Image: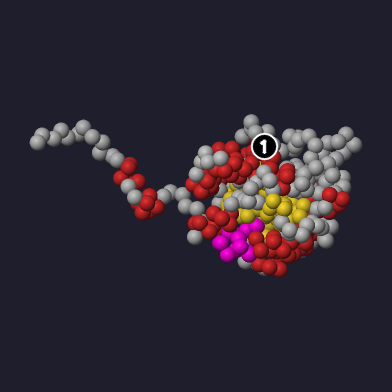
Amino acid sequence: MSTTYGTFPGSRPRRLRTSPAMRRMVAETRLHPADLILPAFVREGIGAPVPITSMPGVVQHTRDTLRKAAVEALEAGVSGIMLFGVPEESKKDAAGTAGTDPDGILQVAIRDVKAEVGDDLVIMSDLCLDEFTDHGHCGVLDASGRVDNDATLERYAEMAQVQADAGVHAVGPSGMMDGQVGVIRDALDQTGHEDVSVLAYTAKYASAFYGPFREAVGSSLQGDRKTYQQDPANTRESMRELALDLAEGADMVMVKPALPYLDILAKVAEAVDVPVAAYQISGEYAMVEAAAANGWIDRDRAIMETLTSIKRAGANMILTYWATEAARRLR
């Protein structure tokens, strides 16, 4: 039998895909439960968890079920929990005073979780006014109805102090006010909370994918946040925000949303020597759950593929509503 040599390829990348064991051995990106952070909502004045209809499987927790969720996340190997408070509607006002009330729902929730898990789980808190204002914006408004940047910074400084007093390990200023990281860092340091970290929402875009989150926090927002969140068209702007946040003392930085902005995430990760987070937001979660419910995609594979892509792009930490579920699967 005659053989013609040189006809077929000598380099065959498929050799490294021949079996699950081979693929596992040569994998370039590995997810670990410790990469994951669970965002969680706790609502004031409810006796049982309230399902979020646009986010199947996610609820507004009671204080008791939040404690349980924190323990489950810890047992699954998740590294952190990011808390969002949902006050009673009657407690919302123009200044978001429930956000700086030591007995407000978010501060109470921080204390609850701290009492349950101590320092074994990194307790993070959303540092923003949007959940607590009757107008739904992330800051206080001026006479013309625009968000007043510098007046809002004063409120953020107060929020940082009460959240730190409640026992939080890291604050997440998400309002995209100019100078917010520096003001919060100073407020923490001046009140004896030098050890509390700042996770800067460095590149937070004015995204269409936040829709389900508005239901999750009972948002009162009218209009949009385009005057303070970033324009989805811009890249250089995110790098400018990054430089400012680092100069102001950010310990960690974040890109939000995740999947529509993997290019931004990769640029940020390449540019810094601090940990980088990405937030897989409500709309990203809802799309996968909705498509899976219709039988259009394999839900479990899609979850892990999206998380892997975020890690591959450079995220050290991923905030995801699937954190506990994915961590259990990874273990």
Magenta residue span: 70-81
Q: In the structure shown, which secondary structural element does the residue marked by tag 1 occupy?
A: loop
User: Residue extending furthest top?
Assistant: 233
Q: Quadrant of residue 162?
A: bottom right
Near mark 1 (Cα within 10 A), the count class, few <14, some 14-19 or many ≥20, is: some
Residue at position x 71%, y 38% in the image: 229
Q: Amino acid under label 1?
A: Ser
Q: Please give left or right for residue 5 compared with residue 135 in the image.
A: left
User: Residue extending furthest right?
Assistant: 143
Whether residue 86 can be seen here: yes
Q: Please give left or right for residue 260 compared with residue 207 in the image.
A: left
Residue 218 spot, x, y in % from top left = 77, 46
Residue 174 spot, x, y in % from top left = 71, 47
Q: Nearer the viewer, residue 136 or 172?
A: 136
**In this rendering, is residue 115 above or below 230?**
below
**In this rendering, is residue 252 above or below 122?**
above
Q: Please give left or right for residue 318 compared with residue 222 in the image.
A: left
Residue 276 spot, x, y in % from top left = 59, 49
Instruction: Give the residue pinned by disc 1.
Output: 207
